[in-house]
Image (cartoon, grey):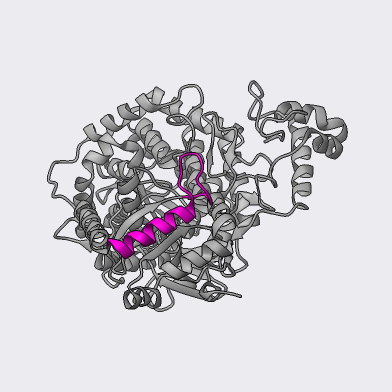
Amino acid sequence: MANRLAQESSPYLLQHAHNPVDWYPWGPEALERAGAEDKPILLSIGYSACHWCHVMERESFEDEETARVMNENFVNIKVDREERPDLDGIYMQAVQAMTGSGGWPMTVFLTPEGDPFYGGTYFPPEDRHGMPGFPRVLGAVAEAYRERKANVQEAGQKLSLQLREVSQAPAAQDPLTQDILHEAQRALVVRFDWTNGGFGQAPKFPQPMTLEFLLRYYKRTGHAQTLEMVELTLEKMAGGGIYDQLGGGFHRYSTDERWLTPHFEKMLYDNALLVRLYLHAYQATGKPLYRRIVEETLGYLLREMTSPEGGFYSSQDADSEGVEGKSFVWSREEVDTALGEGAEAFARYFDVSSTGNWEGHNILNVKEGEPLEPEGQLAELLKRGKEKLLRLRGERIPPGRDDKILAAWNGLALAGLAEAACVLDREDYRQAAEKAAAFLLAKLRPQGRLLRTYREGQAKLLGYLEDYSFLIDALLVMHEATFEVRWLQEARDLANEMLRLFWEPAESAFYDTGTDHEQLILRPRDVMDNATPCGASVAVDVLLRLAILCDDASYNEAAAAALRQVQLLMSKQPSAGGHWLCALDFYLSSPIELAIIGPREESATRELLAAVYGRFLPNKVLTGADGSADGEWPLLQGKAMLERRPTAYVCERYACKEPVATPEALTQQLEAAG
């Protein structure tokens, strides 16, 4: 018999719709019942691609006796963290404060008022490896609430107060200087793994925003060691098992320090961020490897993660048929049977053996000493082999896919796709980006207020700061890719609404939830760049660019004030402030202002654009028009084609150099400006 989750749209919640647990979604019905019956709340938070979430469901939530104890003693609420990052952020802070660590599935016990008083992550079905069994936890918490309720309530109130105090933004007036960038770079050098690339030891995450900052730092300083850090990491990841050598795209992270064994889920946000990182590395170095990774990863997103309407799905599971990684690994026998004569060379290159390199199976990875970009006969043999194995993999039962469409993550993917269309001059990417952008604005902003999530025709939940800022970023890139003014107008409109809903001038801080959001135990304010950039760091980034595009100093003032609040984070914890550092790099620069006037599809216009996109210019703002410049936008005012030829204007603070109509002349001006 289905529970209340059967009425939800989230695939993660629907996975639990037939548990014997009397689950509620988060909402007034559950909260009012907890108050009316004076029962504590058991809040369980996870996500669809989470391996241990599936394990805990099988072991505990599908167990009749465990469900009986839960139903008798608690009001049970299940939350998809991807739909509700506000709840996830608040109660993850609580669990970390109580236990010193966090993760998913997250299990938190709350008073009826929402105050957290006990929590943890995965609990096994019986006592194991020093962890208490879930039934023991349920019994102890229920007894504590019955017998010592006043103590429980006091503990919960104290913790909520502590969380509220931490979330307040301190005043900061110190000037923003390049010293912050230098200190951050030095801190990252200390943590860098000079053998395998990346930072720290196992488990190892890609950290694309940190690497983006280092690439910018190299551009700013010419510091060769910094570029070496970026390139070593990108090459090791591209050859490792964290990268899907057959189908393209990256798995979530590596369980070892050398990028061999991934946790096999694939997340939209990882791949979107890594597309832009490899794309920028290609601009900075011209190396074909980086272009290939961009095209293969976008090929994966367009093939497997794009809805018929044009939006991008959220994730793919680590598990197939309940077994982690089953869809992605191979035996030597399978490779031999599929490839015949070419199997030996293929197996040698991709480290395939009869014993395997992971639990008796083989994760394809480029063996040490083999070239990442093979040539000649080997390249052709590997290409044919990969195509054959990818077709065979398509016949296997695929990993589960979370097909909800999130505004924020779609903004990341759209930005990567649109920028790749510009840099690689790919018309197919541009068309896919236009379809995605039109879909997002039509379906997730039907009446002005941006919404968070969409699935099967239903959009819901008020958008968060990250939904706004990530989508604004994507729309600015869409304008670059098309020269259409409508994307600029949409970006400006969303930015104004973002400031109205999320910016608190008195505190010089962005909050993650809007002023129209439901009242929780605190208003969340996350300033850490983690797996994705935080909403605030991207908000600052887009406001700095819009300040130039719109000639609006108020955007710049808000961005600078927000940057001042996180100076210590940027300099002392740069791995948690990667995108903040990128925004600071822009703020401290004299951005190149570019206007290209000419029909976007004309070869002469494309040659001018190739001169721009053929180099890494992170601190630029580009706008364009097809020949009839729009006077509403300052960088386009007074700009026209010279002698009916597509023309480029290179400016700084709206003072422009002599307009040029050849890529050679434009290149000279860009080099001088850079």
Residue 403 can be seen in this image: no
Residue at point 36%, 67% (across, down) = 489
Q: Nearer the viewer, residue 381 or 454?
A: 454
* Quadrant holding the N terminus: bottom right
Segment colored magenta: 122-148
Is the residue 264 above or below the residue 550 in the image?
above
Residue at point 51%, 29% (across, down) = 257
Is the residue 37 above or below the residue 19 in the image?
below
Give how far across and how far down residue 139 sits, in percent.
42, 58
Give how far across and how far down residue 621 sits, in percent.
35, 50
**90 left or right of 314 in image:** left
Q: Nearer the viewer, residue 22 or 517?
A: 22
Q: Nearer the viewer, residue 635 or 244?
A: 244
Q: Which image quadrant for residue 156?
A: bottom left
* Quadrant holding the C terminus: top left
Is the residue 196 above or below the residue 619 in the image?
above
**416 left or right of 386 in image:** left
In the rendered image, the residue lying farthest to the front is: 147
Give how far across and how far down residue 365 sits, in percent.
65, 32
**211 left or right of 364 in image:** left
